[in-house]
């Protein structure tokens, strides 16, 4: 006779770790505490995103059934320790850039590999990255740079940072003014982008080439995209797949950029397209 032992899932919210660029990183951990090292899955949010957006908490619970799941706010995403949801710190948002996001992700990976509190729960030899939208580009670049990453997943991921609205436009006007603003349709905030963002991009343009990074990847790469995504068109997923040596492309029919979710998400279950995402991720990760 066999017995099933139920281990409740722990959700430790808003762990604070020190960032490299003067602002803290706020992190969540979802896992079942059983003194057994588990594969580690680190999720990166996208542009104008945050770790608690929409249904990301439900997605975390679902994926943490088989992993130690971490999601975090980039240090300069506009959130704060006191208010990690939305964008109370627009000055930080305006001073964000790709270098800071890559450094933040490295800090989180380092934390996973050196943390004593969870050392019996984290298998630091099995770290996978998952990134949504702009975060998809970040995880591709970091996976190409860091040998500790064993698998990578993009959700509605971008294929070219150089073509994003935060990089292009009237560059001369942006240089003269030092700042340009983008309206957040949900919060109605005018969100600043300081010219330093463009300067950082140009100074590191080769490093920030997602094509270069993906072509370098020698690990399994899973690309998930909705064919009704109007924010990041499906051809960007096709680009990623064409560059990947070990990539697989999963197109979710009629799925939008956020796979049916919205913020806030007040339901107890995932939207169906995000359920599809979870199923694909689990299959890809071998869970």
Image (cartoon, rainbow, N blue to C red):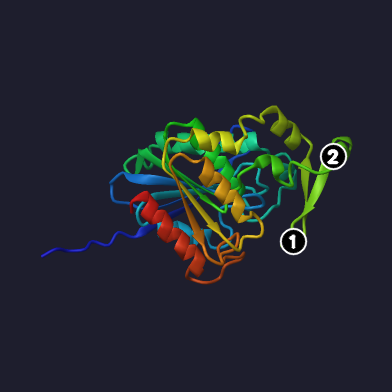
State the SS at label 2. helix
Look at the image and tell me whether residue 153 can be seen: yes
User: Label 2, on which residue?
Assistant: 174
Look at 47% across and 35% down and name the residue there: 217
Image spot of residue 33 (x, y percent): 33, 51
Q: Residue furthest top?
A: 203
Q: Quadrant of residue 103?
A: top right
Please give the label number shown on residue 2. none
User: Does 156 sit above or below residue 55?
Assistant: above
User: Label 1, on which residue?
Assistant: 185
Look at the image and tell me whether residue 64 can be seen: no
Compared across the picture, whether 39 is left or right of 29 comes to left
Cα gap from disc 2 to disc 1, whole angstroms: 21 Å
Look at 61% across and 52% down and name the residue there: 235
Q: Residue furthest front?
A: 242
Look at 47% across and 32% down and name the residue there: 146
Label 1 crowd (10 A; few <14 / some 14-19 / many >=20): few
| Dot placed on the residue nearer the N-terminal end, 2 or 1 | 2
Q: Name the quarter where the C terminus is drawn.
A: bottom left
* Residue in front for this viewpoint, 228 or 25: 228
Image spot of residue 94 (x, y percent): 74, 43
User: Does 217 sit above or below residue 242?
Assistant: above
Look at 62% across and 41% down and name the residue there: 75
Image spot of residue 31 (x, y percent): 38, 53
Q: Quadrant of residue 156?
A: bottom right
């Amino acid at each position: 006779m066999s017995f099933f032992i139920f281990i409740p899932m722990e959700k430790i919210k808003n762990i604070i770790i020190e960032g490299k660029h003067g602002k803290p990183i706020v992190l969540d951990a979802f896992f079942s505490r059983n003194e057994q090292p588990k594969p580690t899955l680190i999720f990166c949010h996208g542009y104008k995103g945050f770790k608690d957006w929409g249904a990301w908490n439900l997605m975390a619970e679902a994926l943490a059934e088989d992993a130690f799941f971490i999601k975090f706010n980039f240090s300069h995403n506009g959130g704060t320790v006191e208010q990690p949801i939305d964008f109370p710190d627009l000055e930080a948002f305006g001073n964000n850039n790709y270098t800071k996001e890559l450094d933040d992700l490295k800090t989180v990976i380092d934390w996973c590999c050196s943390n004593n509190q969870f050392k019996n729960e984290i298998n630091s030899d099995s770290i996978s990255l998952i990134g949504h939208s702009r975060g998809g580009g970040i995880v591709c670049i970091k996976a190409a740079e860091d040998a500790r990453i064993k698998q990578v997943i993009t959700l509605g991921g971008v294929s070219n940072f150089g073509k994003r609205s935060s990089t292009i436009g009237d560059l001369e006007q942006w240089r003269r003014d030092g700042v340009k603003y983008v309206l957040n349709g949900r919060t109605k905030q005018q969100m600043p982008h300081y010219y330093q963002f463009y300067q950082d991009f140009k100074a590191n343009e080769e490093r920030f080439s997602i094509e270069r990074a993906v072509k370098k990847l020698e690990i399994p790469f899973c690309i998930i995209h909705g064919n009704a995504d109007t924010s990041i068109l499906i051809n960007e997923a096709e680009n990623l797949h064409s560059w990947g040596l070990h990539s697989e492309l999963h197109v979710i029919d009629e799925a939008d950029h956020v796979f049916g979710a919205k913020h806030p998400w007040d339901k107890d279950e995932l939207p169906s397209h995000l359920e599809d995402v979870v199923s694909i991720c689990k299959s890809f990760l071998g869970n």
